[in-house]
Image (tube, coloured by chain):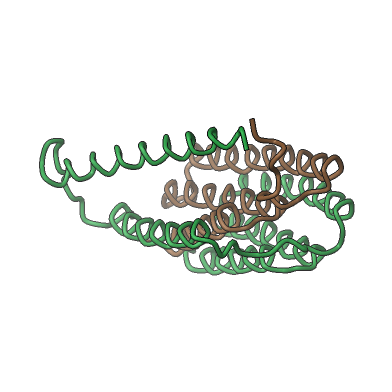
Chain colours: A brown, B green
Amino acid sequence: MSTLAVASSLLILVGLYGVVLKRNLLKIVIGVELLALGVAGLVVDAGVIEAGVAHVSQGVALIAVVGGSAVVALMTVTAVRLYEKHKVIDVREMRRLKG
Amino acid sequence: MDSPVGIVLLVSAVAGIVALEMKELKTSLLAVGAAIVLFAIGMFVARAAEVGIGALVAAAVVLPLWRKAFARIGGRDEVPGFDRSGAGVLSGVALVVFAVVLFVVLGRVAPGAPLVESESAGGQVGLLRELLVVCAALAAVWAMLRKTGRRDE
């Protein structure tokens, strides 16, 4: 097992920790970003060849990073709008969104 | 080549933990920025320049956005860090179990690891595997139904 794979897995776990256990919506968003970076790292690790990293692997990892960032940007804007409307950033208190 | 990249990404993961744990949102922003930039550096070292450039571009977009968001929400994170109820503890345990499974699987599928022939469907291990998948699917359905049921509260 390469150190790149281990480190990427750790990034994924840190991101998951943020998504699953944090209650602040912005911290959850940070967790999603870290998760996307970790997934990209694992994809890069899977494509390591003697001459560097396979182009297909780089492309897929790039999509993971950029797509993750787009999702994160959207989530951030939604979180801010929610805060401005309801003055709540704790996910446990967002009862009005249900239904 | 592999070890320096791993170390850089490990530091990036540590910066991620710092970003999640800090109460001051400005420090969180700095830490997550450091995590993304370190990831980009790691990708450049690993000769995956496309991914490194992508991460830097993503940082250039996401970090100013977070800066603005943190400024609007306030300088400090007042939300309690952990949910100490049963559900929170269960989530923590599930995360730890997932971490263990992830590293066990990584050890088996890593390049250079001996190839292990997969148990065919219908065998004892295969049956257990299918049972676990069905249980996971049922748990997901139960969780969704539980959430939907709260609409009337």
**Vertically, is A16 above or below A79?**
below
Residue B149 shown left or right of residue B77 in the figure: left
Write the residue at 83% across / 48% down.
A87
**Vertically, is B9 above or below B144?**
below
Write the residue at 70% across / 55% down.
A24
Residue occupying the far top of the picture: A99
Q: Position of residue A48 (x, y in %)?
A: 44, 50
Residue occupying the far front of the picture: B153
Write the residue at 70% across / 50% down.
A25
Q: Position of residue B111 (x, y in %)?
A: 32, 54
Between A71 and A48, the residue placed more toward the observer is A71
Residue B114 shown left or right of residue A66 in the figure: left
Q: How many marks?
A: 0
Residue occupying the far left of the picture: B123
Between B68 and A94, the residue placed more toward the observer is A94
Quadrant hosting residue B29: bottom right
Q: Position of residue A66 (x, y in %)?
A: 65, 40
Quadrant hosting residue B118: top left
Quadrant hosting residue B90: bottom left
Q: Position of residue B51 (x, y in %)?
A: 61, 46
Between A29 and A86, the residue placed more toward the observer is A86
Q: Quadrant of the C terminus of chain B?
A: top right
